[in-house]
Image: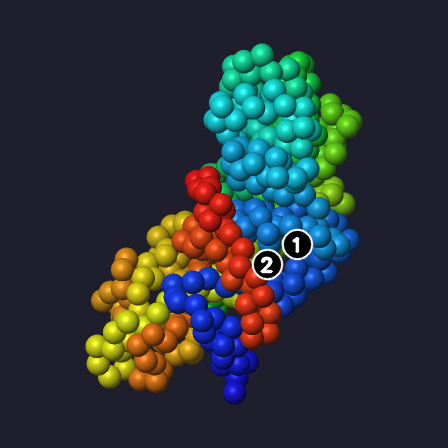
Amino acid sequence: MTARAADRARYDRATAPLDAPLAIVDLAAFDANADDLVRRAGGKPIRVASKSVRCRALLERVLARDGFAGVMSFTLAESLWLARSGFDDVLLAYPSADRAGYRELTADPKLAASVTVMIDDPAQLRLIDEARDGGREVVRVCLELDTSLRLLGGRMRIGARRSPLHSPAAVADLARVVARRPGFEVVGIMAYEGHVAGVGDAVDGRPLRSRAVRLMQAAARRELAERRAAVVRAVRAVAPGLEFVNGGGTGSVQHTAAEDAVTEIGAGSGLYVPRLFDNYTSFRGRPAALFALPVVRRPGVGVVTVLGGGYPASGAAGRDRLPVPYLPEGLRYDPQEGAGEVQTPLLGSPADDLLVGDKVWFRHAKAGELCERFDVLHLVEGDEVTATVPTYRGEGHTFL
């Protein structure tokens, strides 16, 4: 029996009393992935990206482990909810226009001390001040650096379109704006190199593209390490109380941690290890989060139909954004239908061994987005479900 077949047998036994569709997290795999992130971080703390987990119980589990400290959130409403729930170090990783949320933040000393907000433009400071409605608490601010690699005199750009702040001078100028404005304090810098941390460099069947990605990423790491260090020096001259410099992601942990200027690493997807992280040379994780769909039809030889399945991930639309049938091994989508809104036909010889009611296990393309489809996660240890915990959705929150 292969390791994957053994996992399927365990998951089927663990969830035998439960009807699909359902989602699980294999705790042994989750913990092993956490240990691997800590190993790669080389002693620097990992701030957990909540968008990649979207489950309070699992955020608490990983933060209880050595090597993890703080949460990187994705909306202001989520940040405030987590702070009220006892998470005392929450970095909002994206700028917000949530005026009601800023009104709450600036009126509550505990929230203001626990949450750090992201800015890259003076207009965001003005929006916060306009939302205060009398709130006098100092707002903790993090400045975001654009990490994109610019070539050919800036005519070619590689990387996500995030912050407009690319040079050390531009980031330091915004730090000065914050320093002159009452009610704000610069406490951090964030620089997420998505073109390094979030792009696989070993894509099956595409050796030339994979080599090009590796060359690009090596160049990007060298350029960013030098520029990030210069940014930190420039900002510390303006804000000597700078508390943290956050960088990296699951795919670049060990590279980013090697930079002296970086004090902490952001990562989250590496806990669940969705399918997009199969294409990396820098690490190998264990799939920890899966969902199961029930077989409801057997249309013919070599075909079964499961209920649901059309759970695409965000990003540029393409086949790599679809979940993949994982267990039993050997199933594939019908190219004429793909993953369906209500039903999904699956082709392959393993279909002939499946009965109506059996479970087919899938891996989502990305990490936490799976939790937007399920109210609960069943936590599996060995061949038992030892706990069932709510996702954000199960607690009544769909922040985006």
Task: Identify the residue at horizontal 52%, vertical 77% (top origin).
Answer: 10
Q: Which residue is mark 1?
A: 62
The amino acid type of the residue labelled 2 equals: Leu
- Of residues 391 and 205, the one nearer the viewer is 391
Secondary structure of the residue carrying tag 2 is: helix
Task: Identify the residue at horizontal 30%, vertical 65% (top origin).
Answer: 307
Task: Identify the residue at horizontal 56%, vertical 16% (top origin).
Answer: 132
Q: Which residue is mark 2?
A: 271
The amino acid type of the residue labelled 1 equals: Val
- Of residues 11 and 5, the one nearer the viewer is 11
Q: Quick check: marks 2 and 1 in contact, CB under 8 Å?
A: yes
Q: Quadrant of residue 102?
A: top right
Secondary structure of the residue carrying tag 1 is: helix
Rendered image coloring scheme: rainbow
- Mark 1 is surrounded, within 10 Å at the Cα level, by few (under 14), some (14 to 19) or many (20 or more) other residues, namely some
Total of numbered circles in the picture? Answer: 2
Q: Quadrant of residue 41?
A: bottom right
- Of residues 91 and 65, the one nearer the viewer is 65
**Could one spot residue 38 in this view of the protein?**
yes
